[in-house]
Amino acid sequence: MNLLTKIISPIPVCAADWNSTCVKDGVATIQGFNCLFANIAQVIVYFAGLVFFIMFIRGGFSYLTSGGDPKKIAKATSTLTMAVIGLVGVIISFLIIKFIESFTGVNVTEFAIPSTP
């Protein structure tokens, strides 16, 4: 497995482990939604990081190749600004969720469907 595949592909949370909460006796259970939700959230975080990285590289390259043209510099600066604003937005949303978790005492970062014994 090459480095790019390791960076881009999400790490299976529960599904690949055949965890007893996701699969019981070889049959998927309703708790499999826990695994699905965790995998989707992980893909979204990877995607947000990848988009930030691409926008940041593109804005920096545009800035370097602007040649002193004020319109190109403004466009490159705008791209860099939007990339940073997006990254800050993702970080702030995570911090807000953590604040709600600490304020209420409810674990809102863990998606769980109760199981019956």
Image (cartoon, rainbow, N blue to C red):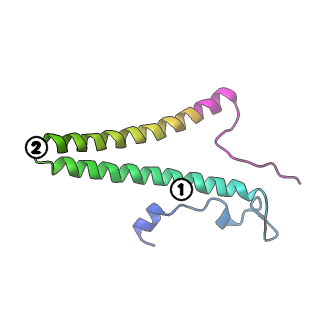
Residue on which the image places disc 2: 68
Q: Residues within 10 Å of mark 2 (few under 14, many from 20)?
A: few
Q: What residue type is labelled 1?
A: Val
Extreme front residue here?
A: 71
Residue 43: in magenta span: no
Where 19 falls versus 113 (above or below)? below
Extreme right residue here?
A: 117
Q: Which of 88 and 19 is in front in this view?
A: 88
Displayed quadrant of residue 88 = top left
Q: Residues within 10 Å of mark 1 (few under 14, many from 20)?
A: some
Identify which residue is drawn at 46% across, 73% down: 1
Where 100 falls versus 65 (above or below)? above
Q: What residue type is labelled 2?
A: Gly
Instruction: Examine the residues drawn in magenta and state their main secondary structure.
Output: loop
Displayed quadrant of residue 24 = bottom right
Tell me where residue 52 appears, x and y as whole percent.
38, 48
Find residue 24 and name its label.
Answer: none
Which secondary structure lies at badge 1?
helix
Tell me where residue 26 appears, x and y as whole percent.
79, 71
Find residue 43 and name its label.
Answer: 1
